[in-house]
Structures are given as C-alpha cells and as structure tokens.
C-alpha cells in the first residue's frame, strides 16, 4: 500500500467511528506520544501540593511525579509557560520543600509541570518521594 492509500484507509476507519471512539483513540495516541518523549517514568501518587502563580495561591493534589516534574489535578486556567512555585508536602518525615516549575502541558484534568533549577537537595527529596510511592 502506498502512503496515500494508508491515509485514505485511516481516514475511512476514523470517520466510521463514533465521536466517543474517536476521543478514546485520540487520548490513547496522545498519551503514547507523551510517554515517548519523557526521559523519566512517572509514578502515580496522591500528594498535597500548595503552589503559586501570577500572584495567586492554590492547593491541589499531585497525581504523578517523576524526576522531571509532576502532574497536578486542577481546573484552574493556566497556559503553557506559566511559572509556578510549588511547595510539596509528602509526609511528616519529610519537611515541605519548595521548587520552581513551569507549565509544560495542559489537559482537561490538570497541568503537567516541569521542574526548573533543581538543586542537589531537591533532587534527593524528589527521588525519596518517588521511591516511597512505589512501596
């Protein structure tokens, strides 16, 4: 099959799907693409996070975490590139710590935040959280 026929066949298959099936396919493909570009695997979590951006303060939950960043469940309006100061509170054993981040992606459930300027101490704390979330 030549490239044009592949495209025609894909278009035909997708056109015959329900809107819900098309949405599921798109979600699947987008998640698959994001996994390809990530350097570090994400660990599911439910960690309280306080964060501030553009002079406003928020509190929500981190849904997953990696050495590079977090996904925060929120319905607040953010745009890619927004700067965020996170205060992560994992447990009573680990004191809350601050880390700078930037919104890297947005989806209906929240925002993906990439860490910026990670110090050695912050890196150790993040790795400790990742290890504890796998237990």
Image (cartoon, rainbow, N blue to C red):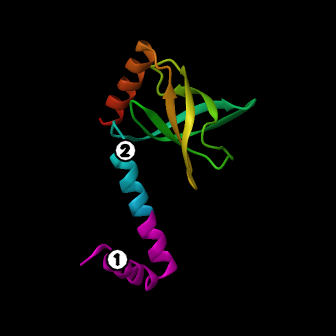
> At x 37% / y 44%, what residue is drawn?
37
Instruction: Point out the tag, 2 or 1, that comes first from the N-terminus.
Output: 1
Disc 2 and disc 1: Cα gap in Å? Answer: 27 Å
Badge 1 marks a residue whose secondary structure is helix
Indicate the position of residue 132 as horizontal and vertical percent values.
34, 30
Magenta span of residues: 1-26
Q: Are marks 2 and 1 in contact (CB under 8 Å)?
A: no
> At x 43% / y 86%, what residue is drawn?
16
According to the picture, the residue beneath numbered tag 1 turns out to be: 4
Badge 2 marks a residue whose secondary structure is helix
Indicate the position of residue 22 as horizontal and vertical percent values.
46, 74
- Magenta segment's dominant SS is helix
Instruction: Give the left or right position of residue 27, taking residue 110 as reference.
Output: left
> At x 46% / y 83%, what residue is drawn?
15
Q: Assess disc 1: are there few (<14), some (14-19) or many (≥20) residues with their C-alpha within 10 Å of its C-alpha.
A: few
Q: Is residue 23 magenta?
A: yes
Quadrant assignment for the C terminus? top left
Quadrant assignment for the N terminus? bottom left
Q: Is residue 32 magenta?
A: no
> At x 38% / y 18%, what residue is drawn?
124
Nearest the viewer among 3 and 20 is: 3
Vertical arrangement, residue 110 with respect to residue 102, above or below: below
Indicate the position of residue 89 as horizontal and vertical percent values.
52, 26
Which of pointers 2 and 1 indicates the residue nearer the eye? 1
Instruction: Give the left or right position of residue 76, taking residue 105 as reference.
Output: right
Q: Assess disc 2: are there few (<14), some (14-19) or many (≥20) residues with their C-alpha within 10 Å of its C-alpha.
A: few
According to the picture, the residue beneath numbered tag 2 turns out to be: 37
- Mark carried by residue 126: none
């Amino acid at each position: 099959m030549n490239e044009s026929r592949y495209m025609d066949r894909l278009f035909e298959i997708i056109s015959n799907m329900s809107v819900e099936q098309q949405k599921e396919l798109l979600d699947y493909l987008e998640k698959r693409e994001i996994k390809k570009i990530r350097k570090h695997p994400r660990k599911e979590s439910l960690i309280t996070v306080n964060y501030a951006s553009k002079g406003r303060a928020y509190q929500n939950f981190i849904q997953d975490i990696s050495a590079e960043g977090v996904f925060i469940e929120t319905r607040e309006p953010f745009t890619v590139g927004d700067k965020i100061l996170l205060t992560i509170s994992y447990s009573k054993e680990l004191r809350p710590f601050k880390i700078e981040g930037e919104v890297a992606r947005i989806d209906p459930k929240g925002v993906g935040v990439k860490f910026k300027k990670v110090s050695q101490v912050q890196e150790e704390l993040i790795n400790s959280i990742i290890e504890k979330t796998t237990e």
